[in-house]
Image: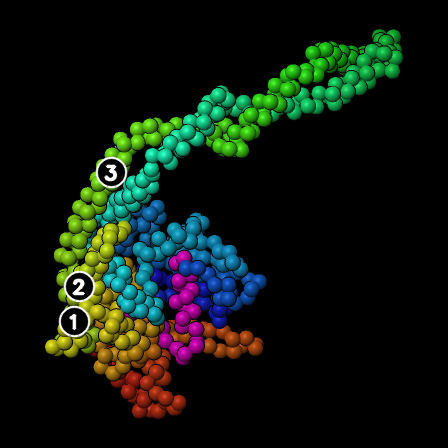
């Protein structure tokens, strides 16, 4: 479960630290107090794209940290499968955002935002204010069914998607192979010319680098010889050369070295210098004797480089790429020379992949049609707990025009909320408030399937009131007995069920606006319920009503 949330320099929050607990955690407050910022900060820590406008101080980084306790062995194993060790059962997810850049970490180790999202999907599920609108899209219905039937489906959806990709490639190859004889002959003629051009060049990997080094040396031959000649003259044995001067100095030292040991040492050092200089001059002379500019060699190197660079301009930037392109062209020539066999192989491959795809589609469809009534029955039961009386909820299966990565099924939720009325598409008859409750029912059912420890509901009470609100609160209470639930709400009926109640308030300090969040005690919770129940003025009667509501909720929780 989510144990702790730490937020710094985000929107209206300068710094906040929240300790959540097990069961139902309620967040309430006046409109605009900053409740959505709390959910938004959790979303950022879980890998959502940061919005530069959310930074409170543009010069200071925003920071969000979530600390989870992981007790469920299935969740631990799932985390290990994605390369995360939960160790002692504590997992720390953090995100530091500076301008348009962010750094995400898991247990202190830097990770990508994609990795953060992958891990967070195993720990927490956020139901946003408008997520129920996704029920208007039929593809969401298939997604929910596959999530419910995940265990029964096994690896079939992944195999189906991969087989579909292979089928699409085989289909594209087949369709792209339909060329007439004259066009094939033109292509074959060009390919044969290109392969011959490459093969006749007799390319050797790495020779271009060696040739370029030789070309550089040959093209600068005169400059090299002039420099060496000057160096030899400066260090040679004529009267002004270094060798003559050093020899003279050595003779002078030799004449007095017997009188002082230190002078003898200097004589030895200078003798070593003379020997080195002599070796150097021999090396220079040898190089100069064999270093005459060779017009023929230069021409051969230049011509060979021109050939290689011409091939590079047509077939690849390196010799390796050119030879690889030559191999591809040779393979294409082989195909064109045996085109009927090639077409037959393409046709056989396409037929094989279509057969595999069809078989997988049928297997997946059979499992979906077997699981759909079970899922719909569970959702109907959950809807009854949310004041949907005599509701009919089922799934109708259609088919797509062709194959897709998800098969050929095109299912849709159908609902009837009045006896005697036939079920109709969910998106055509459900209101916003009804969609919100239907999504809550689906989330309740899915919570038992996916095993996600923490559920967050951001204002799921949209469009409901009265008895329906009471039933929603009872459903939230039941759900929180199996999972940690964090809920932002405006309804006192839901807030009254809180195991932990947090109040979010906005204040102005030193001409700046801040949002603060604090945990309420029992009396504070009753006072907040009174605010939610009352109008401008909160009377003693309203307070007593709030206290009674809280007591009834506690009795319900303990029953």
Q: Earlier in the sequence, mark 1 or mark 2?
A: 2
Quadrant of the rendered image containing residue 247: top right
Q: Earlier in the sequence, mark 1 or mark 3?
A: 3
- The crowding category of the residue bearing disc 1, from other C-alpha atoms within 10 Å (few below 14, some 14 to 19, many at least 20), is many
**Mark 2 and mark 3 residues within 8 Å of each other at the beta carbon:** no
> The magenta stretch spans which residues?
24-47
Relative to residue 83, is residue 557 drawn left or right?
left
Q: What whole-number distance in Å separates the C-alpha atoms at marks 2 and 3?
A: 35 Å
Q: Position of residue 552 (x, y in %)?
A: 23, 81
For the question of whether residue 295 can be seen, the reply is yes
Give the residue at x 27% y 35%.
Answer: 343
SS at mark 3? helix
Q: Front-most of 491 and 129?
A: 129
For the N terminus, give its image quadrant: bottom left
Q: Earlier in the sequence, mark 2 or mark 3?
A: 3
Q: Position of residue 307 (x, y in %)?
A: 56, 25
Compared with residue 153, is residue 463 higher up or lower down, i.e. above or below?
below
């Amino acid at each position: 479960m989510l144990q702790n949330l730490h937020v710094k320099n985000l929107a209206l929050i300068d710094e906040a630290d929240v300790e959540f607990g097990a069961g139902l955690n309620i967040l309430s407050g006046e409109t605009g107090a900053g409740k959505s910022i709390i959910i938004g900060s959790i979303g950022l820590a879980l890998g959502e794209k940061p919005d530069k406008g959310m930074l409170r101080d543009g010069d200071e980084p925003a920071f969000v940290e979530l600390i989870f306790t992981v007790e469920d062995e299935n969740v631990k194993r799932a985390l290990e499968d994605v390369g995360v060790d939960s160790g002692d059962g504590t997992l720390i997810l953090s995100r530091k955002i500076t301008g348009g850049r962010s750094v995400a970490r898991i247990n202190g180790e830097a990770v990508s935002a994609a990795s953060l999202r992958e891990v967070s999907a195993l720990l927490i599920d956020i139901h946003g204010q408008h997520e129920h609108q996704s029920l208007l899209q039929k593809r969401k219905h298939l997604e929910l069914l596959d999530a419910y039937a995940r265990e029964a489906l096994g690896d079939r959806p992944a195999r189906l998607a991969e087989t579909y990709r292979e089928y699409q490639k085989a289909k594209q190859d087949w369709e792209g192979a339909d060329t007439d004889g004259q066009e094939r002959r033109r292509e074959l003629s060009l390919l044969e010319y290109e392969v011959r051009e490459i093969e006749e060049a007799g390319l050797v990997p790495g020779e271009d680098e060696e040739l370029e080094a030789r070309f550089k040396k040959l093209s600068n031959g005169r400059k090299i010889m002039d420099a060496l000649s000057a160096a030899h003259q400066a260090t040679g044995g004529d009267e002004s050369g270094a060798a003559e001067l050093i020899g003279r100095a050595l003779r002078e030292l030799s004449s007095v070295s017997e009188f002082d040991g230190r002078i003898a040492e200097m004589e030895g050092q200078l003798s070593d210098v003379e020997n080195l200089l002599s070796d150097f001059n021999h090396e220079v002379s040898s190089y100069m004797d064999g270093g005459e500019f060779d017009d023929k060699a230069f021409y051969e190197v230049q011509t060979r480089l021109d050939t290689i660079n011409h091939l590079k301009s047509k077939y690849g930037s390196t010799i390796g790429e050119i030879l690889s392109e030559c191999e591809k062209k040779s393979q294409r020539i082989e195909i064109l020379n045996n085109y009927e066999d090639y077409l037959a192989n393409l046709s056989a491959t396409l037929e094989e992949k279509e057969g595999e795809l069809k078989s997988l589609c049928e297997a997946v469809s059979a499992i979906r049609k077997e699981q759909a009534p079970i899922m719909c029955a569970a959702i109907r039961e959950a809807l009854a707990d949310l004041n949907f009386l005599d509701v009919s909820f089922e799934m109708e299966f259609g088919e797509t025009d062709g194959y897709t990565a998800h098969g050929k099924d095109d299912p849709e939720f159908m609902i009837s909320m009045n006896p005697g009325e036939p079920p109709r598409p969910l998106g055509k008859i459900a209101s916003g408030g009804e969609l919100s409750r239907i999504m809550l029912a689906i989330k309740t059912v899915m919570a038992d399937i996916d095993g996600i420890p923490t559920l967050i509901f951001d204002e799921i009470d949209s469009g409901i009131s009265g008895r329906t609100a009471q039933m929603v609160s009872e459903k939230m209470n039941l759900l929180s007995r199996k999972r940690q639930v964090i809920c932002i709400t405006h309804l006192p009926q839901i807030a009254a069920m809180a195991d932990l109640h947090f109040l979010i308030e906005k204040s102005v300090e030193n001409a700046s606006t801040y949002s603060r969040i604090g945990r309420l005690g029992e009396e504070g919770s009753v006072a907040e319920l009174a605010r939610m129940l009352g109008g401008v003025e909160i009377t003693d009667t309203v307070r007593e009503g709030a206290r009674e509501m809280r007591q009834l909720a506690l009795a319900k929780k303990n029953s």
